[in-house]
Every structure is written in C-alpha cells, then in structure tokens.
C-alpha cells in the first residue's frame, strides 16, 4: 500500500472519529427538549459550539503536524 493511500485512510479515520464524537456529545448534552430560545442560552450555545470547533481544529492541526513529521522522517511521499 502506498504512502498516499495510507494518508487518505488515516485522514478518513480521523474524520469518522470526529463525527462519532460530535454525535455522542450531542446525545449526552441534549437529552431534554430545548426551552424557548432566550438570548442568554443562545450565547452560551454559540460559545460551547465555538469551543468545540476550535478544540477539534487544534486536534486536527496537531494530528496533521505529527503525520507530516512522520512522513518527513520516513523520507517523504514517494
């Protein structure tokens, strides 16, 4: 198997893990029906989602950085 297919498979696995994690978080956080929207809870939701997205973004950057270092240490993509 070439390095490129390994890279694609690795990225696919990371995306699947992130999607499953997001679904699990939604299920855990939201077991109750939502109350009528008032702006304070709306702001809290936006903050929570923003924190989640930035955390996932940082995790993705870290994973890509470590993958890049691993590829470079093995002599790059052939």
Image: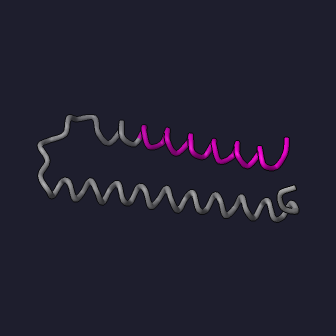
The main secondary structure of the magenta stretch is helix
Looking at the image, residue 35 sits to the left or right of residue 75; the answer is left
Q: Which residues are magenta?
A: 1-24
Task: State which quadrant residue 75 falls in.
Answer: bottom right
Residue 9 covered by magenta stretch: yes
What residue is shown at x 78% (from left), y 60% (from top)? 70
The residue that appears at 14% across and 41% down in the rendered structure is 35
Task: Write the residue at 30% across / 60% down.
Answer: 47
**In the displayed structure, does residue 44 sit left or right of residue 58?**
left
- In the picture, the quarter occupied by the N terminus is top right
| Residue 50 position within the rendered picture, expressed as x and y whole percent measured from the top left | 36, 59
Say left or right for 39 vs 17: left
Q: Is residue 49 magenta?
A: no
Q: Position of residue 68 (x, y in %)?
A: 73, 62
In which quarter of the view is residue 39 placed? bottom left
| Snapshot colouring | one colour
Q: Residue at x 69, y 46 (%)?
A: 10
Q: Is residue 34 left or right of residue 65?
A: left
From what the image shows, is residue 24 above or below residue 62?
A: above
In x, y percent, where is residue 59? 55, 58
6 in relation to 62, above or below: above
Image location (x, y in percent) of residue 67: 71, 58
């Amino acid at each position: 198997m070439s390095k490129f297919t390994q890279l694609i498979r690795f990225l696919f696995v990371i995306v699947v893990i992130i999607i499953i994690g997001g679904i699990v978080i939604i299920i855990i956080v939201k077991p109750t029906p939502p109350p009528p929207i008032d702006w304070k809870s709306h702001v809290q939701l936006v903050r929570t989602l923003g924190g989640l997205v930035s955390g996932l973004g940082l995790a993705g950057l870290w994973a890509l950085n470590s993958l890049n270092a691993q590829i470079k240490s093995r002599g790059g993509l052939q």
